[in-house]
Image (cartoon, grey):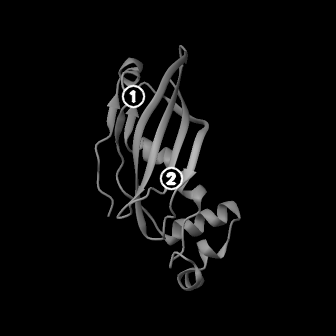
């Protein structure tokens, strides 16, 4: 059950830029289920048993359950951001890269994650492009340590 969270809306570049250094919000929870893990394994060719063999992972892994690929967790960051904020002048968004990523704790199949999103920087590249740097802490419901901390860069075209 994923709850609805109102996205924070920014109508101008200046409004967004004024939030540099601040937390912008927290996304709704997202369940990382075994089906999503298996689909990611198919897409990437990473079929390591700790992710896709439920019986073996439950019985042999140190986590007592299958876990999501670290890169699956990382791949959720753009969705978590877009479920948290909306930059209204944007006509398109492009993933530009990552500055820093750390995987702190595994996400067990069936667990829920959410993103705590902060704005690290925002700059106008030209009349039609804005570059933003977000810091996203991917929290695991009921866990002390986050799954992932990522600094991601996006280009917004308007």
Q: CA distance from mark 2 to mark 1?
A: 27 Å
| Residue 6 locus on image (x, y percent) | 28, 43
Q: Tag 1, which secondary structure? A: loop
In-image side of 130 versus 111 (left or right): right
Q: Tag 2, which secondary structure? A: strand
Q: Residue at x 58, y 41 (%)?
A: 100
| Among numbered discs 2 and 1, the one appearing first in the sequence | 1
Reply above or below: 103 against 143: above
| 17 and 36: which is toward the camera | 17
| Residue 74 locus on image (x, y percent) | 55, 52
- Dot 1 corresponds to which residue? 88
Reply above or below: 32 against 21: below
- Dot 2 corresponds to which residue? 148
Q: Quadrant of the N terminus?
A: bottom left
| Residue located farthest toward the right when viewing the structure as drawn | 45
| 2 and 100: which is toward the camera | 100
């Amino acid at each position: 059950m994923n709850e609805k969270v109102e996205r924070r809306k920014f109508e101008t570049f200046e409004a967004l830029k004024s939030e540099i250094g601040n937390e912008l919000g927290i996304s709704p929870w997202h369940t990382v289920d075994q089906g999503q893990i298996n689909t990611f394994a198919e897409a990437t060719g990473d079929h390591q048993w700790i992710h896709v063999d439920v019986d073996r992972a439950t019985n042999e892994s140190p986590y007592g359950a299958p876990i999501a690929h670290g890169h699956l967790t990382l791949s959720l960051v753009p969705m978590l951001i877009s479920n948290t904020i909306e930059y209204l002048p944007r006509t398109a968004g492009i993933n530009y890269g990552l500055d820093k990523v750390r995987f702190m704790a595994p996400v067990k199949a069936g667990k829920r994650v959410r993103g705590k999103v902060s704005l690290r920087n925002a700059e106008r590249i030209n009349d039609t492009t804005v570059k933003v740097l977000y810091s996203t802490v991917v929290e695991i419901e009921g866990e002390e340590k986050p799954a992932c901390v990522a600094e991601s860069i996006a280009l917004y075209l308007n």
